[in-house]
Each structure stands twice: as C-alpha cells, then as structure tokens.
C-alpha cells in the first residue's frame, strides 16, 4: 500500500526538507542580525515584536536566525513596529547572491532556472531585426 505525505493548502508537501544550501545564506543571516539588534535596541522581546507586527513569535526567531526569507511587506511591518525604516534595517548589509546560471544557489527548492546563453542569443537576434516604421498620429494640431 502506497502512502503519500499530507499536502498544505498551497499544494506543497508538509514537512518536506529544503536543501541546507538554501537557507540560511549570507543575506538572510545579515538581515536577521540587523533585526535582532534593532529589536534589542527597542527593548522588545520576540513575543512583543511578534504581537505588535501581528506575526508568529516563531517567525521572528526564524528571521533572526536566517532560516526564512520574509516578504517585503512583513519587513515593512516589523520596521513600523520597531520605529525604524527599511533602509535602516538593511543598513550595512553588503551581501549579494549570484544568479543560478552564474553558479549561485537557488533561492527556493522549486525555482525555475533560465538558459542564459540561449536567452542572450535570442536578444542579439531580436536587435538585428529592422525597427518598425513610426506610426503617424491622427491628431490634428
């Protein structure tokens, strides 16, 4: 008898383990360290911040440890709750990530990747096509 793992409402298998190379990464770790520093400067616990920002306490912990990639809107809400701006939260973060086609890690397990060389060729071919003739306006002046 074959059994299947339960699926969440989004269709992903619950409990599926992501590759350890995905998270944490230098970007999520730096963001998490900044969030923790600002939270402690505001003299808030993870519970206080979670309550104020209307997110789960465990989510705050996971962000601070670099294990999740929070949305921009979540970060904006956390900043509001801490009395800081997004640029302040990102201050000092210099880490970047290469695209997968250039040797970087995938941002998520099911991320699609592009065939960069074929894409560059298609762009070059498209540029060699003669431009369309301009359309004259029917407007009277």
Image (cartoon, rainbow, N blue to C red):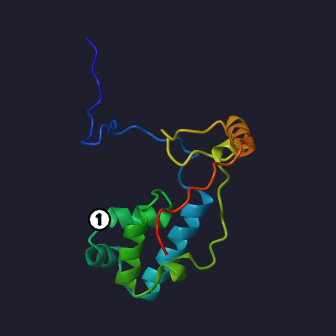
In the image, 11: left or right of 62? left
- Residue 51, image x, y percentages: 26, 75
Q: How many marks?
A: 1
In the image, 78: left or right of 36? left
78 shown above or below 139: below
- Residue 57, image x, y percentages: 31, 67
Residue matched to label 1: 56
At mark 1, the secondary structure is loop
Along the viewing direction, whichever of 92 and 85 lies nearer the viewer: 85
Q: Residue at x 26, y 71 (%)?
A: 54
Residue farthest toward the top in the current orientation of the protein: 1
- Residue 25, image x, y percentages: 59, 56
Along the viewing direction, whichever of 54 and 115 lies nearer the viewer: 115
124 shown above or below 55: above
- Tell me if mark 1 has few (under 14), some (14-19) or many (20+) residues whose alpha carbon lies within 10 angstroms of its own: few
Rendered image quadrant of residue 20: top right
In the image, 13: left or right of 131? left
Along the viewing direction, whichever of 49 and 89 lies nearer the viewer: 89
């Amino acid at each position: 008898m074959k059994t299947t793992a339960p699926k969440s409402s989004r269709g992903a298998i619950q409990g599926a383990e992501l590759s350890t190379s995905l998270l944490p990464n230098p970007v999520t770790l730096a963001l998490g360290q900044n969030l923790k520093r600002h939270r402690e400067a505001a003299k808030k616990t993870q519970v206080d911040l979670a309550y104020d920002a209307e997110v789960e306490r465990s989510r705050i912990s996971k962000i601070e440890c670099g294990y999740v990639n929070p949305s921009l809107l979540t970060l904006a809400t956390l900043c509001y709750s801490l009395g800081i701006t997004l640029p302040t939260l990102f201050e000092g973060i210099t880490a970047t990530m290469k695209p997968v086609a250039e040797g970087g890690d995938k941002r998520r397990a099911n991320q699609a990747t592009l065939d960069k060389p074929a894409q560059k060729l298609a762009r070059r071919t498209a540029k060699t096509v003669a431009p369309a003739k301009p359309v004259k306006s029917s407007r009277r002046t």
